[in-house]
């Protein structure tokens, strides 16, 4: 493909240009798609022929009402229609969940699906991001996540199972236990958009359990499972009150005629659908093994229809992405614009073996220099750890972490130390914010930033609202000084220095009772009274730079993953490669 097609990545607000845009800029044929997580085996060719034969009627006439289409889907899934709301894609449902049910704050592990971080931030909510650690294979520890939520006083919790982009899986009993422990929250969302591809359990979904609880929503996707992203349809399941509240806000014809046609076709093609999922799981196993054979490439266990891989040391994801597209007509998802990830990571969709062999050949030539343009692995520390060139990323960097973590922590007056990776949990301000070891953020320098003896920190000065926060005295570090930030209403005066550390809650304590976990002393942070200005970590919430463990400008250090030579079996469990 011509080199100019890569410019489309820098002119789109999404993570990648659409297939239609790539096709228009090339010679009329799109690339092999390892980017969009579709089911490559469904619908079947016969189903596509049937839809093509009825194309004129499908696009000419109005669809039935959403209630009619929802009733048909519920008949197939054996769900009560009053507990289901169908949307024009899961993104429409996420938007309504945010507008209707997220009042003040939302917690979500990162990296994850970008709408769970961006959507509430766009409406002025506080987003508390719980960083998944590369050193533990991006596995989510639900006990530590619960402690994180309690420490910040977050009102809505989100879990994606399997998680996107890493494919991490949580067993059903653990998810149900978490739901019950968070029974006092405003809302708990379990995003099961990719759960149909999991095979670690026979019945991994918590849909039935969600309908019995007052504050739980389960989100499901149809486009991903059926390989039909362009149709835009998904659904949520909750108790009748919650589902009805969302359903009442949706337009009468929010579902299109293609969605209706596919839903009514499904009852005749259940066997083909089940076979397609089985084949994707087999392909995932084979693809993981082939990619694991590439030197320096790390493949993480996945239960989705994609694999999360770390490139060899020194490889820059945008370079690899662009060269795979222009030299080999292969489209991949570079993850530099995912909060909690970097440009060293790719998400690769599971595809048939013939396509995987083409991908492996392309990666060998791009990464190891067997093509005319040489290797894409420069000297260490060249390139960037966070680069994608999209407008959404530029906005996030500018507004959230452009000032650097040191400046933000001081400007917020929260006295919140930037946590460093440590074998034991630490306790934050006021003894009320335990930071689990798995959530520790790697720092570019080995010395603790806020505890350096040679660099005494200036005492925080009270700042009347709405006068901008005065800048601290310049420190001899390589981070540019932040711009002045307005003092939020939630911080009328600086928080005093942290009290002596109190022992954190034991992980099991997070699930002892649905009531909030007791703390030795109340948090010395006043409750939030409104949206937090961009770039200020409200009430102890992390900024994007803090989540990445960087100052927003420097390259994040690479960390290893124990057992990098292992790869997942069909059940997603680690198994030594033979």
Image (spheres, helix red, strand yellow):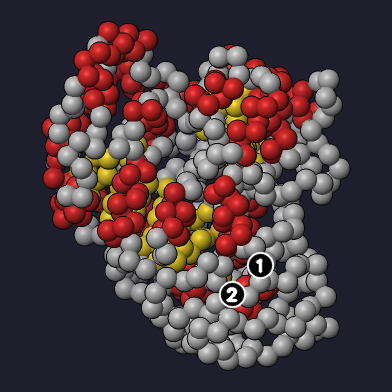
The image position of residue 547, as x and y in percent, is 59, 61
For residue 356, what is the image quadrant?
top right
460 horizontally vs 152: left or right: right
For residue 441, what is the image quadrant?
bottom right
For residue 69, what is the image quadrant?
top left
- Which of the two residues, 481 or 509, is positioned nearer the viewer here? 481
Q: Quadrant of the N terminus?
A: top right
Q: Secondary structure at mark 2?
A: loop
- Whether residues under marks 1 and 2 lie with C-beta atoms below 8 angstroms apart, the answer is yes
**Residue 237 appears in view:** yes
Q: Secondary structure at mark 1?
A: loop
What whole-number distance in Å separates the C-alpha atoms at marks 1 and 2? 9 Å
Task: Provide the residue designation for mark 2.
Answer: 485
Q: Earlier in the sequence, mark 1 or mark 2?
A: 1
Mark 2: few/some/many CA within 10 Å (<14, 14-19, 20+): many
**Residue 356 appears in view:** no
- For the point 44% across and 84% down, the residue is 526
- For the point 77% across and 23% down, the residue is 365
Residue 189, numbered label: none
Residue 403, numbered label: 1
The image position of residue 567, as x and y in percent, is 61, 35
- Which of the two residues, 63 or 563, is positioned nearer the viewer here? 63
Q: Quadrant of the C terminus?
A: top right
Q: Is residue 273 above or below residue 402?
A: above
- For the point 34% across and 56% down, the residue is 98
């Amino acid at each position: 493909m011509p080199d100019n097609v890569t410019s489309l990545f820098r002119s789109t607000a999404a993570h990648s240009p659409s297939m239609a845009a790539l096709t228009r800029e090339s010679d009329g044929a799109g690339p092999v798609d390892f980017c969009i997580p579709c089911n490559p085996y469904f619908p079947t060719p016969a189903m596509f022929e049937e839809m093509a034969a009825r194309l004129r009627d499908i696009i000419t006439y109005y669809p039935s009402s959403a209630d009619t289409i929802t009733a048909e889907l519920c008949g197939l899934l054996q769900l009560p229609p009053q507990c289901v709301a169908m949307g024009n894609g899961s993104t429409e449902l996420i938007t309504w969940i945010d507008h209707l049910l997220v009042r003040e704050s939302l917690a979500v592990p990162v990296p994850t699906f970008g709408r769970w971080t961006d959507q509430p931030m766009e409406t002025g909510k506080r987003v508390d991001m719980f960083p998944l650690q590369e050193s533990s294979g991006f596995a989510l520890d639900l006990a530590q996540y619960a402690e994180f939520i309690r420490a910040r006083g977050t009102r809505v919790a989100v879990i994606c199972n399997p998680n996107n982009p890493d494919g991490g899986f949580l067993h059903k009993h653990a998810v149900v236990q978490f739901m019950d422990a968070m029974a006092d929250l405003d809302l708990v969302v379990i995003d099961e958009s990719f759960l149909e591809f999991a095979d670690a359990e026979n019945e991994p979904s918590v849909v039935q359990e969600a309908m019995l609880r007052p504050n739980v929503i389960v989100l499901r996707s149809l486009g991903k499972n059926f390989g039909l992203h362009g149709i835009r349809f998904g659904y949520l399941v909750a108790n009748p009150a919650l589902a009805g509240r969302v359903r009442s806000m949706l337009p009468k014809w929010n579902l299109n005629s293609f969605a209706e046609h596919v839903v009514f076709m499904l009852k005749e093609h259940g066997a083909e659908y089940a076979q397609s999922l089985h084949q994707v799981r087999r392909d995932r196993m084979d693809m993981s093994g082939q990619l694991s054979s590439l030197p320096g490439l790390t493949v993480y266990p996945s239960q989705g229809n994609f694999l999360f891989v770390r490139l060899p040391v020194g490889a820059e994801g945008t370079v690899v992405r662009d060269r795979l597209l222009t030299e080999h007509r292969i489209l991949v998802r570079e993850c530099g614009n995912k909060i909690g990830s970097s440009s060293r990571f790719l998400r690769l969709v599971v595809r048939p073996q013939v396509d995987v062999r083409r991908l492996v050949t392309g990666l060998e030539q791009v990464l190891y220099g067997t093509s005319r343009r040489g290797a894409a692995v420069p000297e260490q520390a060249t390139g960037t750890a966070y680069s994608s060139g999209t407008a959404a990323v530029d906005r996030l960097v500018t507004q959230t972490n452009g000032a650097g973590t040191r400046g933000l922590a001081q400007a917020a007056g929260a006295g919140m130390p930037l946590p460093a990776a440590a074998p034991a949990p630490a306790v934050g301000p006021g003894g009320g914010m335990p930071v689990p070891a798995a959530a520790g953020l790697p720092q570019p320098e080995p010395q603790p930033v806020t505890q350096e003896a040679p660099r005494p920190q200036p005492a925080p000065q009270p700042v009347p609202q709405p006068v901008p926060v005065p800048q601290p005295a310049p420190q001899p570090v390589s981070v540019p000084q932040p711009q002045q930030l307005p003092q939020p209403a939630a911080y009328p005066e600086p928080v005093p220095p942290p009290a002596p550390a109190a022992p954190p809650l034991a992980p099991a304590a997070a699930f002892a009772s649905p009531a909030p976990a007791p703390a030795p002393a109340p948090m010395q942070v006043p409750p939030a009274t409104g949206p937090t200005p961009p770039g200020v970590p409200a009430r102890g919430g992390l900024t994007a730079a803090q989540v990445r463990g960087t100052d927003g400008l420097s390259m994040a250090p690479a960390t290893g993953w124990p057992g990098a030579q292992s790869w997942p079996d069909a059940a997603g469990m680690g198994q030594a490669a033979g």
